[in-house]
């Protein structure tokens, strides 16, 4: 799924995200912080200094103004923005209704 194939409305954002990236054997292979560039009810586009493998699993904690959202996702695409910056599209595969409500509260235009 490319970024353009998303069916949800994308909202520009600048949320900090802490993440754990998993390898094929479900072991944590990287942990760090990234910056969300846009977010929707179906996923998030993050900016990071290192690329992720497509189809890798990611656990994320997304900082909102007054809350945090914990979710899991799958890396769907990676684009090099410049030699030290990558744009990584992650599809949510596990997000609770409560977390979706928090997301809608923060971004009312997300349907």
Image (tube, rainbow, N blue to C red):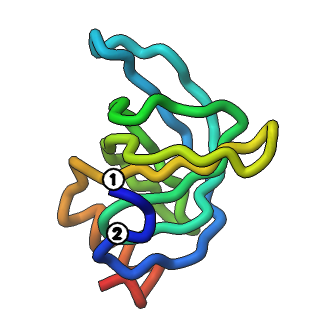
Residue 63 image offset from top left, x and y in percent: 54, 55
Residue occupying the point 53% across, 47% down:
88
Mark 1 Cα within 10 Å, few/some/many (few <14, many 20+)? many
Residue occupying the point 74% across, 43% down:
85
Residue 5: image tag: 2
Task: Report the mark closest to the observer, 2 or 1.
Answer: 2
Quadrant of res 69: bottom left
Vertical placement of 61 versus 59: above or below? below
Quadrant of res 34: top right
Is residue 78 or residue 40 the one in the foreground? Answer: 78
Quarter of the C terminus within the rendering: bottom left
Mark 2 Cα within 10 Å, few/some/many (few <14, many 20+)? few
**Residue at numbered disc 1:** 91
Residue 15 image offset from top left, x and y in percent: 61, 60
Residue 69: image tag: none
Vertical placement of 45 versus 107: above or below? above
Residue occupying the point 38% across, 46% down:
76
Quadrant of res 1: bottom left
Q: Residue furthest bottom?
A: 109
Q: Gap between marks 2 and 1, in whole Å? A: 11 Å
Kind of element beneath mark 2: helix
Asked if residue 18 lies left or right of residue 73, the reply is right
Residue 31 image offset from top left, x and y in percent: 55, 24
Asked if residue 76 lies left or right of residue 101, the reply is right
Kind of element beneath mark 1: strand
Is residue 24 or residue 104 the one in the foreground? Answer: 24
Residue occupying the point 28% across, 10% down:
25
């Amino acid at each position: 799924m490319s970024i353009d194939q998303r069916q949800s409305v994308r909202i520009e954002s600048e949320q900090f995200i802490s993440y754990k990236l998993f390898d094929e054997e479900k072991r944590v292979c990287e942990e760090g912080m990234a910056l969300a560039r846009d977010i929707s009810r179906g996923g998030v586009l993050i900016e990071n200094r290192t690329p992720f493998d497509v189809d890798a699993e990611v656990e994320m904690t997304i900082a909102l103004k007054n809350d945090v959202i914990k979710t899991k996702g799958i890396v769907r695409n990676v684009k090099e923005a410049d030699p030290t910056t990558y744009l990584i599209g992650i599809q949510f595969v596990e997000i609770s209704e409560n977390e979706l409500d928090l997301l809608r509260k923060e971004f009312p235009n997300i349907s």
